[in-house]
Amino acid sequence: MPAPSFPSLTHAIGVFDSGVGGLSLLKAIREALPNEDLVYVADSAHAPYGDRGEDFITQRTLVLGAWLAQAGVKAITIACNTATVVAAKRLRENTQLPVVAIEPAIKPAVALTRSGVVGVLATRQTVQSDNVARLCEQHGAGKLILLQACPGWVEQVEAADLHSPHTLALLHTYIDPLLAQGADTLVLGCTHYPFLRDAIQSMVGESVVLIDPAQAVARELVRRLSDQTAQPPRVGHTYFFTTGDQAQAETAISQLWGAPVQVQPLKQV
Ligand code: DGL
């Protein structure tokens, strides 16, 4: 598993996801840390993680974490709720680097709901995980928390298909039952889903609050790095890698990132 040959990844911040979804968190990190170099790995050859087994997700998390560590990054961000709830603990046991990980924002959603009903939209693995059960137990007293798996959504975002009739039908399938049960607050518990935010918001109306913890995670990363030497004022670079098809990743990432980007292949991991 050779590390990249150019030196620029040394002291960069490593960020990974099963695919392009983690770009929603990468955007928040870029805003919070404009001077830092960022390296993003989309594990597109293995997306989606949400229907995979725990052993598979753990193995991918450890392999990607090891690749980033070998490349010289100073911190790792898990930009994938599914990898976090299944494997963040194992990654932390396997690296000396700071690991910051996104997880479904159940606590803030419980604080915000007025109807007392919160919907959590996430992958199958995430909604079935012990970690999400623990979050509900810790923060959900007196509220109804509805855990909703949304199979198919990740694939639509991977294809950068955010508004087609098929995508909208898939959104209705999983959101309508939550609204029917009185949910007024919906947690976007998968980093792919913020890219569907506009479509979801126009479907549910402005009275329903959508929660994406990306900015809070970026702030946590800033805190974790605060004892390290600050980068001199400069514009940080962002490097993109994919384990999947390079041309396809370049098209999807450029569209979702909002600017044309080059994506480098990462075939050996
Ligand atoms: N973006 C991921 C998450 O936050 C993973 C989705 C998937 O690959 O199923 O859960």
Image (cartoon, grey):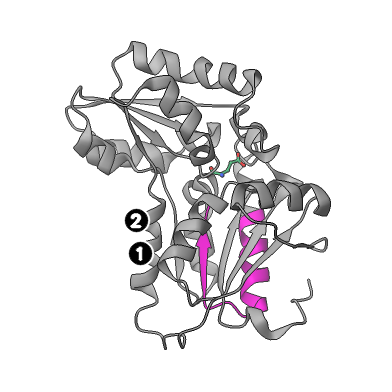
Is residue 68 toward the left or the right of residue 126 in the image? Answer: right
Query: Which residue does the image show at 72% across and 62% down from the upper left?
Result: 241
Query: Which residue does the image show at 39% across and 21% down from the upper left?
Result: 204
Between 163 and 68, the residue placed more toward the observer is: 163
Query: Which residue does the image show at 66% across and 82% down from the upper left?
Result: 8
Residue 140 percent location from the top left of the image: 24, 34
Give the image quadrant in which the ligand numbered 1 is located: top right
Residue 44 percent location from the top left of the image: 72, 48
Is residue 110 toward the left or the right of residue 202 in the image? Answer: left
Q: Is mark 1 on a helix, strand or loop?
A: helix
Which residue carries the number 2 mark?
216
Q: In terms of secondary structure, what is the magenta stretch mainly?
A: helix
Residue 22 percent location from the top left of the image: 56, 51
Q: Tell me if residue 30 comes above or below residue 231 in the rendering.
A: above
Q: Tell me if residue 93 comes above or below residue 227 in the rendering.
A: above
Is residue 123 toward the left or the right of residue 133 in the image? Answer: right
Q: Residues within 10 Å of mark 2 (few under 14, many from 20)?
A: some
Q: Is mark 2 on a helix, strand or loop?
A: helix
Q: Distance between the residues labelled 2 and 1?
A: 6 Å
Q: Does residue 245 appear in the picture of this structure?
A: no
Which residue carries the number 1 mark?
220
Circles 2 and 1, Cβ within 8 Å, touching? The answer is yes
Task: For the C terminus, give its image quadrant.
Answer: bottom right
Query: Which residue does the image show at 50% across and 28% down from the upper left?
Result: 199
Task: Indicate which disc residue 268 carries.
Answer: none
What residue range appears in magenta? 60-79
